[in-house]
Amino acid sequence: IKDRELHTVEHKLVLDSIYPETILNKTVIDIGAGSGAFLNSISKLVALSVAVEPDEKYRYAMKDELYDVFQKISDVNKKFDYVFSLQVIEHVKNPVDFLKEIKKNMHQESRLIISTPNRNDILMKVVKEKFEPFFYRKAHRFYFDKGSLEYCALKAGLKVIGTKFIHQYNVSNFIGWARDFMPTGVSNIEGVDVDVDVLWKKHLESHQNSDNIYTILGL
């Protein structure tokens, strides 16, 4: 149940990143779709959804879904209204080449949404020594802040429509790190309610210290 709740929160944040625009009745592709959780959550809202996923076991998990699944971006010969690549760019060999490859699936009105962990996460400032081993992972080749992510986009020939700082985890998670030097996930500490979480989220996002960055790009 906690995993399902976490995915629900994550998907809401993705849609928050494009607000006030909407994916309703639009064509959508998810590049690096994993097992298809995001597409499954929006498939009834959109006109067409397509997944790109290099990992065979994840493609197999999507084999019975109602959308097409491809191994590589180059296998898809279509342009989409919305292109999503969520928590993927930090894994690729060359972020600029990755963005260049995505461009062929975009038309002049397309929006490309790239999300990635924020190198200026508040925990990197408050408990940097303890948080760094958790944040810096072998699976991640690159780490981004606003400037470096936008730089890669411009080098790829894309236009930066906007960058949003969106925070996922609650105050209880921050307290867990500050007190115990370990994450608490989405669990709540007694006495910390949703009102505090809302203020915390707004504060971090306004100071660019959220845990995630969402950059919206166009041609």
Image: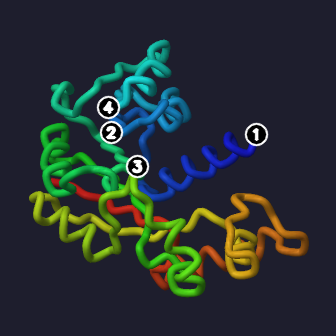
* Rendering quarter of residue 76: top left
Sequence-wise, the earlier of marks 4 and 2 is 2
Q: Which residue is mark 3?
A: 86
Q: Secondary structure at mark 2?
A: strand
Residue 51, horizontal then vertical, whole percent: 36, 29
Residue 198 seen in the current view: no
Q: Which residue is mark 2?
A: 31
Sequence-wise, the earlier of marks 3 and 4 is 4
Q: Residue at x 25, y 58 (%)?
A: 217
Q: Residue at x 19, y 62 (%)?
A: 153
Sequence-wise, the earlier of marks 3 and 1 is 1
Residue 195, horizontal then vertical, whole percent: 77, 73
Q: Which residue is mark 4?
A: 54
* 178 shown above or below 139: below
> Is 28 left or right of 152, judged from the image as shown?
right
Q: Residues within 10 Å of mark 1 (few under 14, many from 20)?
A: few
Residue 209, horizontal then vertical, whole percent: 49, 79
Q: Residue at x 15, y 45 (%)?
A: 103
| Amino acid at dot 4 | Pro
Residue 175, horizontal then vertical, whole percent: 73, 77
